[in-house]
């Protein structure tokens, strides 16, 4: 969708951009502009990420030494595990790309002036803030130690009432997720620019659209589960606690019926980002547009059918285990479609290696390792050995951190010129990538070996033969932390002192690059008319 494919000039006035549309903190707090709301999500999620990262570094620092150390007592270690997991999953990775990049990019890529329900969009942000505040208060004042999964009966019968506050926080943030998903679906269907059919929308939109379906259908299951925990905790109703006639395995069914689709709430938007980066930095029409688009919908559909692979050792029948194993392996088909199409897009393309592209390549490498190791865990026989070991920890992080956060960093560097009208230092971005990519592999690849050796996860201490690999893993965590610090400094420097960005510094074809940088308040001075596909490189 180059400028040649639109029938109107979009204007390039710098005094009419959304950053200058109203000044002062109150104008931001009450804004209905999707772009400003996206940036507010970015500031909030980034702050929470730094807090969650602090707990991660504390855990790794503690595990650098075999035997009891003065750094973390056993109870404190459990609390660090809970805080790190709950913050990173519910407050960072799930809302990260959809709420931040999705809010900023989706309406502009569709040629719309805003999302369908701007007031609901702002309300979603404040609901997220309220939920995060409730969850954080439970961590600070009640110091919950259940882990981010809240497994029963420990979370209902053995711990303080802080669990109720923490699940209330997650419950509240769920409403933000549902409302954001609803807004994106309606916007995609109703506010597309003239000429933009569903087979002309960017792949980022397809990814966010599929994610929104999961958010709307799966999140209520989590809400019901959390309400049942609260009811059992406060009213003594026997739902999950066996002492009250409940069934703790029932909680696992409920929790993972939401939480495995939630994995794709985290990863599908990341795949959408990668599709945009690969085609933009290969200067080539993306290979297999429809296959990538429909594979996003296929992943969303299959994600609801695989929760049982988390429960191979929980006593479910052999037949159920076989069925869940087969369906889980089937998820690799639409995922592989995306990966091979990205590789095919780069083949004979004019590939350049700016910072966003490096993060895209890092995503492809790390997510592939995460996906392949998932096949091991999908096999019932091997899962018995690997279950609740550091192999699972490594697999989870290769998918979530190696996937979602690599894509998020790539997306930030890619759309930064459009957000702020300035360029970041490409050298700073590359240094950040080297540190994060290297540190990530140094941190988590040894954990595959530790898991194969039998080291259990969530343990305060370990056997002496695990010491060397744990120390290597801890050194890697410092490199990751340094890489994100460099990335943060690069972003702040870009905001304050970055060179003025052209409207389309990457030569991309989607609509957001056909308006000014930063965009006007209403995104386009005149509504664009679309006459070609989103990646029409000629």
Image (cartoon, rainbow, N blue to C red):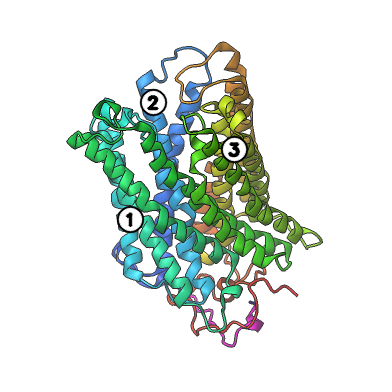
Q: Is residue 401 magenta?
A: no
Q: Is residue 33 left or right of residue 289?
A: left
Residue 462 in view here: yes
Q: Residue at x 34, y 51 (%)?
A: 173
> Spatial distance from mark 1 to mark 3, Cα to Cα?
31 Å
Q: Name the mark nearer the viewer: 3 or 2.
A: 3
Q: Name the mark nearer the viewer: 1 or 3.
A: 3
Residue that mark 1 sits on = 175
Q: Which mark is residue 78?
A: 2
Q: Is residue 264 left or right of residue 216?
A: right
Residue 470 is situated, as x and y percent measured from the top left of the image, at: 57, 22
Nearest to N terminus: mark 1 or mark 2: 2
Q: Is residue 170 left or right of residue 486?
A: left
- As helix, strand or loop, the secondary structure at mark 1 comes to helix
- As helix, strand or loop, the secondary structure at mark 2 comes to helix
> Spatial distance from mark 1 to mark 2, Cα to Cα?
28 Å
- Residue 380 or residue 469, whichever sits in front: 380
Bounds of the magenta segment: 2-15
Nearest to N terminus: mark 1 or mark 3: 1
Q: Name the mark nearer the viewer: 1 or 2.
A: 1
Residue that mark 3 sits on = 378
Residue 423 in view here: no
Against 82, residue 351 (above or below) is below
Task: Verify CB contact (< 8 Å) between mark 1 and mark 2.
Answer: no
- Residue 15 or residue 79, whichever sits in front: 79
> Spatial distance from mark 3 to mark 2, Cα to Cα?
28 Å
Q: Residue at x 50, y 84 (%)?
A: 527
Residue 532 is situated, as x and y percent measured from the top left of the image, at: 65, 79
Residue 476 is situated, as x and y percent measured from the top left of the image, at: 59, 31
């Amino acid at each position: 969708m180059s400028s040649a494919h639109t029938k109107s000039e979009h204007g390039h006035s710098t005094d009419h951009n959304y950053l200058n549309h109203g000044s002062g903190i109150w104008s931001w707090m009450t804004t209905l502009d999707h772009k400003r709301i996206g940036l507010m999500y970015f500031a909030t999620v980034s702050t929470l990420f730094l807090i969650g990262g602090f707990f991660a570094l504390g855990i790794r620092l503690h595990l650098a030494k075999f035997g009891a150390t003065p750094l973390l007592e056993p109870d404190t270690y459990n609390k660090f595990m809970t805080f790190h997991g709950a913050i990173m999953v519910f407050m960072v990775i799930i809302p990260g790309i959809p709420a931040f990049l999705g809010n900023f990019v989706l309406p502009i890529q569709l040629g719309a002036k805003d999302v369908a329900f701007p007031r609901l969009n702002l309300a979603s942000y404040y609901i997220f803030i309220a939920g995060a505040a409730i969850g954080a208060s439970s961590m600070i004042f009640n110091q919950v130690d259940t882990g981010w999964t809240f497994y029963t009966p420990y979370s209902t019968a053995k711990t303080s009432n802080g669990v109720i506050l923490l699940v209330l926080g997650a419950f509240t943030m769920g409403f933000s997720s549902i409302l954001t998903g609803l807004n994106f679906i309606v916007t995609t269907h109703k506010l597309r620019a003239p000429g933009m059919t569903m087979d002309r929308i960017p792949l980022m939109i397809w990814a966010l659209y599929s994610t929104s379906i999961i958010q709307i259908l799966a999140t209520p299951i989590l809400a019901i589960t959390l309400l049942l925990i609260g009811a059992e905790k406060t009213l003594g109703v026997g739902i999950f606690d066996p002492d009250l006639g409940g069934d703790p395995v029932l909680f696992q069914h409920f929790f993972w019926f939401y939480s495995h689709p939630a994995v794709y709430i985290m990863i599908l938007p990341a795949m959408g980002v990668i599709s945009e980066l690969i085609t933009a930095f290969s200067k080539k029409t993306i290979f297999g547009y429809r296959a990538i688009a429909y594979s996003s919908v296929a992943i969303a559909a299959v994600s609801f059918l695989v929760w049982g692979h988390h429960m191979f050792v929980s006593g479910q029948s052999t037949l159920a285990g076989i069925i869940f194993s087969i369906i889980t392996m089937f998820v690799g088909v639409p995922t592989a479609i995306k990966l091979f199409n990205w590789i095919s897009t780069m083949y004979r393309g004019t590939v350049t290696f700016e910072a966003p592209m490096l993060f895209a390549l890092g995503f492809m490498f790390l997510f592939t390792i995460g996906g392949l190791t998932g096949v091991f865990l999908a096999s019932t026989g091997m899962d018995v050995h690997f279950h609740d070991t550091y192999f699972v920890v490594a697999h989870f992080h290769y998918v979530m951190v190696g996937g979602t956060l690599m894509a998020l960093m790539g997306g930030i560097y890619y759309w930064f010129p459009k957000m702020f009208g300035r360029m970041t230092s490409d050298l700073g971005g590359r240094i950040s990538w080297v540190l994060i990519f290297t540190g990530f592999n140094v941190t988590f690849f040894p954990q595959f070996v530790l898991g194969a050796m039998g080291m259990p996860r969530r343990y305060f201490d370990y056997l002496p033969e695990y010491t060397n690999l744990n120390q290597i893993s801890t050194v890697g965590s410092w490199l990751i932390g340094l890489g994100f610090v460099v990335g943060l400094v690069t972003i702040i420097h870009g905001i304050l002192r970055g060179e003025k960005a052209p409207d389309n510094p990457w030569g991309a074809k989607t609509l957001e690059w056909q308006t000014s940088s930063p965009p006007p308040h209403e995104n386009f001075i005149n509504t664009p008319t679309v006459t070609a596909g989103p990646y029409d490189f000629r």
